[in-house]
Image (cartoon, helix red, strand yellow):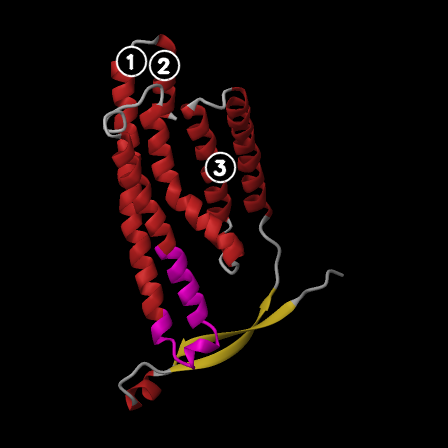
Amino acid sequence: AELRRWVEVGFWTRRSEVAQSVSSSTQWSQETTSLLVQNLPLADVSLSLVWFFLQLGIFSVGALAIWRRPFDQSARLFFAMCIVTLVAFVGGFHWWVVAGNPWLNTPFVLCAVLLPVVSLHFFCSYPQPRRPLSTHPRATLLVGYAIPLLSATGLVLLLEYSRWLSGPASGGTLEPLHESLGWLRLAIDAYLLIAASCFIAILVVLAHGYLTTRHPIHRSQMKWLFWA
C-alpha cells in the first residue's frame, strides 16, 4: 500500500468576533493542523517540461549565435532575453517552490523584472537601433535599466523583510507582516504597469519596423515577431 505522509503546520488566524470586541486591536491566535504531502500534478509538470525544452532549443540557438558572432549586439541581447525568459517562467510557474528560498527567489525576481525592459531593448536594437536608443543611447539605457534594477532591489528587500517578520521577530503579532505584504503587493502592481508599458512599446516598435524597413528578410521577421 502507498504510504501517506502527513505534516503538522502552524498558522495564524483571526480570533472570533466576540474575542475581538474585547479589544479595539485585531486579535490573532496561533493554530495547528495536519496536511497531506502530495506530489505535483502530472499535467503541471509535463507542461513545464515541454515549455522548458522548447525554450531550451531557442536558448541553444541564441548561444550558438553569440558564439559565432560575439560582437553582434542583437545576438547578445537575444541571448540575454532567452536567459531572463527561462528563469522568469520557471520561477513564476513554480513560485511556491522558490518562494521560501532567497537563493532561488532573488534570481527569479531579478529576471522577471528585467524581462520587459530586456525584450524592449532587443526589439529597439534589431535590425537597427531606433529612437531614442539611436540618438541618446546612454541616457536611454540608464533610465531603462535603472528603473527595473531599483524595483527588483526593493522587491527583494520587501520579501526578505516579510520573511523576517514571519519568524520569531513578529513577537506574536501579524500587523507588521500584513503591512509589509501590503506594500509588496502595491509595488508589484505598480511595476506591472511599467511592464505593460514596455510590452505596448514593443508592439509599436515592431509595427514601425515592419512599415519602415525595406529589406525583405527583415520585413518578414518583423511580421512574424509581431504576430508571435
Label 2 sits on a secondary structure element that is helix
Residue holding disc 3: 83
User: Is residue 199 magenta-colored?
Assistant: no
**Which of disc 3 and disc 1 is earlier in sequence?**
3
Labelled disc at residue 213:
1
**Which of disc 2 and disc 1 is earlier in sequence?**
1
Residue holding disc 2: 218
What quarter of the picture does the C terminus occupy?
Answer: top left
What quarter of the picture does the N terminus occupy?
Answer: bottom right
**Which of disc 2 and disc 3 is earlier in sequence?**
3
> Taking 5 as reference, is 213 above or below it?
above
User: Who's the residue at 47% across and 73% down the image?
Assistant: 167
Labelled disc at residue 63:
none
Q: Are marks 1 and 3 in contact (CB under 8 Å)?
A: no
User: Who's the residue at 28% across and 30% down the image?
Assistant: 137
Segment tinted magenta in the rendering: 154-177
Q: Nearer the viewer, residue 191 or 68?
A: 68
Rendered image quadrant of residue 47: top right
Label 1 sits on a secondary structure element that is loop
Q: Are marks 1 and 2 in contact (CB under 8 Å)?
A: yes
Q: How far, Cα to Cα, is label 3 from label 2?
A: 24 Å
Q: Left or right: where does residue 199 sit relative to residue 109? A: left
Q: Left or right: where does residue 201 sit relative to residue 77? A: left
Q: Left or right: where does residue 109 sit relative to residue 131? A: right
